[in-house]
Image (spheres, helix red, strand yellow):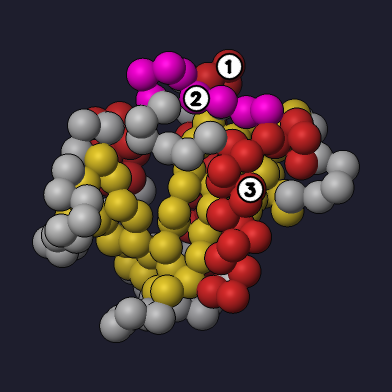
Amino acid sequence: MLRLSEVTEENWQEAASLSVKEEQKGFVAPAVGIIARGYVYRACRGRVFVLEDDGAAVGLALVREFTDEPPGYDLQQFMIDRRYQGRGLGSRALKLILEELRRENRHDHVEVCVKKADIGAIRLYEKHGFRDSGYVDESVPDALNMICSLTEMRP
């Protein structure tokens, strides 16, 4: 059964060993970098979720809050290990993350920045209600800023 867990003393090394396929490495930070960013972003409630399926670490996600107007959640990093891709775990994990943020109810939306070349990720986010926000970050011109309303999600 897929579940979200916190990074702990017991699971951080397994989580840090996760990796995406070679052709995906330009789209997401290495696992150890994702874990480190969770620490760096602690002032803005940065959290790293270990995605576990039947007790095995299969992926990671980093969510933080941002205070730009309007304030919301930022899904900074999201990855499924190369050995577990193609099983629908990314879709199930994203659904769990969105449900957790909706339940937390601190903000009404989630944003994610996705490289335009990462067609698989764009399709996954669109499947879960993310749409192009129209915002263009000039420091990342090759990326889409996508947004998902948590208030429009069904419980």
Task: Give me the C-alpha separation between circle 1 and circle 2.
Answer: 8 Å
2 within the magenta span? no
| SS at badge 1 | helix
| Discs 1/2, front | 2
Image spot of residue 73 (x, y percent): 44, 68
Instruction: Residue 131: tell me if it is visible.
Output: no
Q: Quadrant of residue 31?
A: top right
| SS at badge 2 | loop
Depth check: give the residue in front, 13 or 124: 13
Label pair 2/3, CB-CB below 8 angstroms: no
Depth check: give the residue in front, 129 or 63: 63
Mark 1 or 2 closer to N-term?
A: 2
Please report the bounds of the magenta region as a residue range: 17-24
23 within the magenta span? yes
At horizontal 68% and vertical 28% (from top left) the residue drawn is 17
At horizontal 73% and vertical 53% (from top left) the residue drawn is 6
| Discs 1/3, front | 3
Residue bearing mark 3: 35
Local packing at callout 3 (Cα closer than 10 Å; few below 14, some 14-19, many 20+) is many
Task: Give me the C-alpha separation between circle 1 and circle 3.
Answer: 19 Å
Residue bearing mark 1: 83
Residue bearing mark 2: 20
Above/below status of 73 relative to 117 = below
* Position of the N terminus by quadrant: top right
